[in-house]
Image (cartoon, helix red, strand yellow):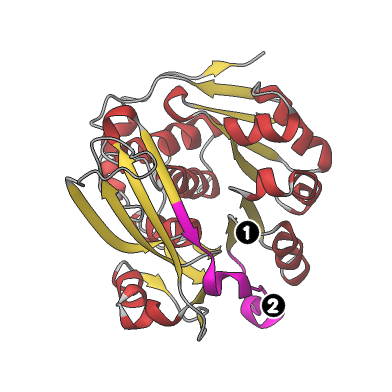
Amino acid sequence: MVLPRPGSQVHLAVGNINIDISLYVPRIPGGDEIVFATDTWVGPGGAATNYSIAVARLGQKSMLRAVAGREAATLGILEAIKSNGVDTSLVSMSPKPAGMVVVMVDAERSLRTMVTVRGANEDLTIEEPHLRGFKGHIHLASVKPQLVSDARRHCRECTISYDPGGEALRRPRDVIEVSREADWVFINTVELKGMTGSPDPLAASVFLERGARLVVVKHGKGGATVLSERRCLRITRLPRVNVVDVTGAGDAFDAAFNVWLLAGAPLEEALRHALAAGSAKVTRRGSSSMPTLEEVLALAGDVGGVEDCV
């Protein structure tokens, strides 16, 4: 088994900083209906922010490139990110409103609804000064495809991963086309179906045809699949855990997959630890409440075996 050496990797997450307000409700309300939340959580969010915290919790060096709106500093969001071991020196401040997400979580039914304000996140760029001298891994999360091209242009020697999130449905053609600039791509089943018309993981080979080395398809409770030019493998059995909040599970997955893959682990081992990280995350309240390395290792043995897809 490969155990990533602490501090041996540097990850730069590029994406959003949000103020997340999570409300845990007995059911998602309908129109003109009031329900009472049983619990709340307020803290930093945004896919790139979640990823950066997850990487730091896994013992690696973590940096964040984002644009923080005015409330991010006054409400202590930046300090909260720093306190998790993330280098925020590339975070720009903006007088615009902070990005914000209100999440209603019905854990019993594995349902959630989200209302988001983009705010200062709209001004995100990745320029040459941000990447000058950088030689690590760049992970772009829920950002416009153009930023992937910008990252590649300014850092030819970096490895790059891209998880387009909602951009997969908003700009499907651009997301597929820009995959040539990424070394590997993360996508979930819903996004894949919206982009290609099929939820079959093999449909994700379109990313390989554009030049990506790997594509990872996340199936939620159904596990995950990894495709390369030579292999297609999947894991469908996850550890049994008490699901509290699925928000951020995909970001924990991405972080663990990247950390193990960059440490030289085989694809099946990277996938197993990614699923363990996602499973550990859902037991915690809050989008950026990421598991530790020890917690991921403890669950990895409960992840099911690898199967060949074809």
Work out which quarter of the rendered image holds the N terminus and state it: top left
216 relative to 55 in the view: left or right:
right
Q: CA distance from mark 1 to mark 2?
A: 14 Å
* 195 relative to 284, above or below: above
- Badge 2 crowding class, 10 Å Cα cut-off, few under 14, some 14 to 19, many 20 or more, is some
Residue 119, x across and y down, in percent = 53, 71
Does 24 lie within the magenta span? no
Give the numbered dot on residue 127. Answer: 2
Q: Residue at x 59, y 22 (%)?
A: 233
Q: Residue at x 66, y 74 (%)?
A: 125
Q: Give the x, y percent position of residue 77.
A: 34, 73
Give the amino acid type for the residue marked by disc 2 in the picture: Glu
The answer to which image quadrant residue 115 occupies is bottom left
* Quadrant of residue 38 within the rendered picture: top left
Q: Which residues are magenta?
A: 115-136
First-in-chain label (1 vs 2): 2
Asked if disc 1 and disc 2 are in contact, CB closer than 8 Å, the reply is: no
Judged from this view, the residue extending furthest toward the front is: 32
